[in-house]
Amino acid sequence: MTLKGNALDHLGHHVVTCKYGGDVVSHHNRVEVGNNDHSKSQPADILLPNWFLVKTAALDVSITSPLNPLTLLEAEVLAKTAAQVTVARKHQANDPKCSELGCVCVPMMAESYGAWGEEASAIISSIALRLATSTCKPKLVVLNDIYGQLIVHLVHANVTAILSRTAPPA
């Protein structure tokens, strides 16, 4: 990965932390497991109608890196994880629009090394319960399958981002 012809990071940290390069969006899109056809004004990647009683859940799928200097500093000051800091930012940015649209904002936040935010974990657990009920499998088995698939997608996206970097100068 280069910026104006200069290699940014030969070790690959930049490709999982920079919010300005294309890798963040493509990383997000490679990990995202579903997508609704919606305008950019909607604060969601996935809409789950009637998820919370009669309200639609607006899932905003995002990947954050605990190596991002700004997130790391904010997490240290607030004694939170990178996922918790980014979830708070997502709520601040998306809650007003979700409220206007009559839905509930749910940041589906994962850290680039595999930790999931609390709200994402709760949604994933709820999905696992519904799948377990409909397939007559134990919830724990279904939950392990879901997390297993998600981590494979996340690791694949991380590896792809790192392998796309430029070689170090000779």
Image (cartoon, rainbow, N blue to C red):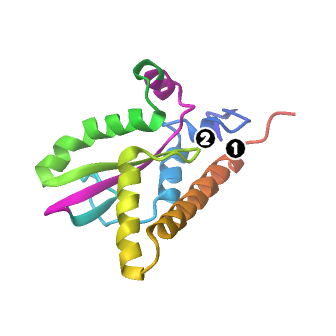
* Residues packed near mark 2 inside 10 Å, few (<14), some (14 to 19) or many (20 plus): many
Question: Where is residue 2 shown, x and y percent of the image?
Answer: 65, 38
Where residue 94 appears, x then y in whole percent? 25, 43
Q: How many marks?
A: 2
> Image quadrant for the N terminus?
top right
Q: Residue at x 46, y 64 (%)?
A: 33
Disc 1: CA contacts within 10 A as few (<14), some (14-19) or many (>=20):
some
Q: Nearer the viewer, residue 44 or 152?
A: 152
Residue farthest toward the top in the current orientation of the protein: 77
Disc 2 to disc 1, how far (Cα)? 8 Å
Q: What residue is disc 1 on?
A: 165
Tell me which amino acid carries mark 2: Val
- Write the residue at 48% across / 21% down: 76
Using residue 2 as the reference point, say whether residue 20 is left or right of it.
Answer: left
Check whether the beta carbons of the residues at disc 2 and disc 1 lie within 8 A of each other.
yes
Q: Is residue 59 left or right of residue 100?
A: right
**Which percent across, then down, holds residue 10?**
73, 35
Specify which label sits upstream in the sequence, 2 or 1. 2
Residues drawn in magenta: 52-75
SS type, badge 2: helix
Q: What residue is shown at x 41% (from left), y 67% (from top)?
A: 128
Residue 101's place in the image compared with 134, above or below, is above
- Asked whether 39 or 51 is in front, the reply is 51
Q: Amino acid at mark 1?
A: Arg
Tell me the residue that label 2 is attached to.
Answer: 15
Secondary structure, mark 1, is: loop
Residue 105 part of the magenta segment: no
Query: Residue 61 lies in magenta, yes or no?
Result: yes
- Look at the picture and state if 25 lies above or below 93: below
**Image vertical order of residue 135 relative to residue 91, above or below:** below
- Quarter of the image containing the C terminus? top right
